[in-house]
């Protein structure tokens, strides 16, 4: 789930969206043999821990009949000493705006706050509401961060191909008390760049597996970025496509860029 954006570590959407490995990282001494759990985790966590991304784009909901609904999107993600912060701002076709702030510590433990245009103050979301899609899409708020790489249980599965890419495969599982909608997240990571190319997220509630496919992988400013991520439910028609139109992988963000106190419909919103 990288963001994704997890342009974001989790576009973060599992990584959201930025799947980055800096030139300095690539030249650094590896944490362990290529393909080892230590090496795979070190690279995946480094992408999150060095996140400093701002991006704009669209969340496109594709119905079973092919009809499309565009939701403008703004993203910001930065790793501070106390953890990762990710701000998501989405505007629906009726011009209603909502913002989400994800705060994630070094163990992958996250909190999510939301502020709708009509809200007088931010509201902390209980974990049982984390499965409500952003603007009615298949992307959950937590899909815009890469907390799974910090969960306690990590298992390296046999290497596999996804399309033409040779991948390391990592299965991540949370502790019982870890707030998340997922029972497990399995990531196919390109062996050359470390970037995610495919992710399967299995919900705790028994719903169909969510599948994330990363397209248009390219290296920009030393980072491997995916400009398009598609989310689908296994065996179900329709999908949601995250499209990144513009962005900066070195945005020099500060804490003031993650302030939810301004109303969601105000000009102060990112």
Image (cartoon, rainbow, N blue to C red):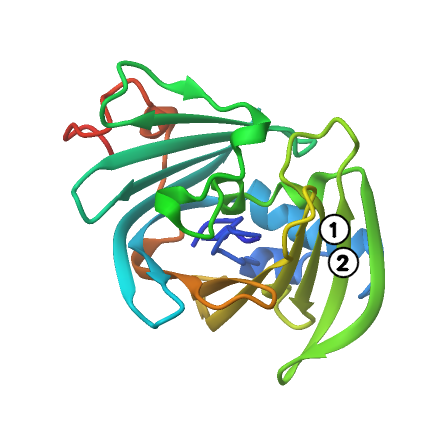
Q: Is residue 153 above or below residue 198?
A: above
| The C terminus sits in image quarter | top left
Identify the residue position indicated by label 1 in the image: 41
> Residue 201, position in %: x, y?
65, 53
Q: Is residue 188 left or right of residue 3?
A: right
Identify the residue position indicated by label 2 in the image: 170
Q: Is residue 153 left or right of residue 58?
A: right
* Residue 8 or residue 27, whichever sits in front: 8
Q: Does dot 2 land on a helix, a strand or a loop?
A: strand
Marks 2 and 1, the one that precedes in the sequence: 1
Q: How many other residues sit within 10 Å of disc 1, few (<14), some (14-19) or many (≥20)? A: some
Where residue 244 sits, quadrant-wise, is: bottom left
Circle 2 or circle 1, nearest the eye: 2
Where residue 236 sits, quadrant-wise, is: bottom right
> Residue 136, position in %: x, y?
38, 46
Q: How many other residues sit within 10 Å of disc 2, few (<14), some (14-19) or many (≥20)? A: many
* Residue 205 or residue 245, whichever sits in front: 205
Q: Is residue 263 left or right of residue 60?
A: left
> Residue 63, position in %: x, y?
37, 64
Residue at left 62%, top 56%? Answer: 25
Q: Residue furthest front?
A: 65
**Residue 135 seen in this snapshot:** yes
**Circles 2, 1 touching at the beta carbon (< 8 Å):** yes
Q: Residue furthest bottom?
A: 164
* Residue 101 or residue 22, whichever sits in front: 101
> Residue 191, position in %: x, y?
69, 71
Calculate the distance from the C-alpha at mark 2 to the C-alpha at mark 1: 9 Å
Q: Does dot 1 land on a helix, a strand or a loop?
A: helix
């Amino acid at each position: 789930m990288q963001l994704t954006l997890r342009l974001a570590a989790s576009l973060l959407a599992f990584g959201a969206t930025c799947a980055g490995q800096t030139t300095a990282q690539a030249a650094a001494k590896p944490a362990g043999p290529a393909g080892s759990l230590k090496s795979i985790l070190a690279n995946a966590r480094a992408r999150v821990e060095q996140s400093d991304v701002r991006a704009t784009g669209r969340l496109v909901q594709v119905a079973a009949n092919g009809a499309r609904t565009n939701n403008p999107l703004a993203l910001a993600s930065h790793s501070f000493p106390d953890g990762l912060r990710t701000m998501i701002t989405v505007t629906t076709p009726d011009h209603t705006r909502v913002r989400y702030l994800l705060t994630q510590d070094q163990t992958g433990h996250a909190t999510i706050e939301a502020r709708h245009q009509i809200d007088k103050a931010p509201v902390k979301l209980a974990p049982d509401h984390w499965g409500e899609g952003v603007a009615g899409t298949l992307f959950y708020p937590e899909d815009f961060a890469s907390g799974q790489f910090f969960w306690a249980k990590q298992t390296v599965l046999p290497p596999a191909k996804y399309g033409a890419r040779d991948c390391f495969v990592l299965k991540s599982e949370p502790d019982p008390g870890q707030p998340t909608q997922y029972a497990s997240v399995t990531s196919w990571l390109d062996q050359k760049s470390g970037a995610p190319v495919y992710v399967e997220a299995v919900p705790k509630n028994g719903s169909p597996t969510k599948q994330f496919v990363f397209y248009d992988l390219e290296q920009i400013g030393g980072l491997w970025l995916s400009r398009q991520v598609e989310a689908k439910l296994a065996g179900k028609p329709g999908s949601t496509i995250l499209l990144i139109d513009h962005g900066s992988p070195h945005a020099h963000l500060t804490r003031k860029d993650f302030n939810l106190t301004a109303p969601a419909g105000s000009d102060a919103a990112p």
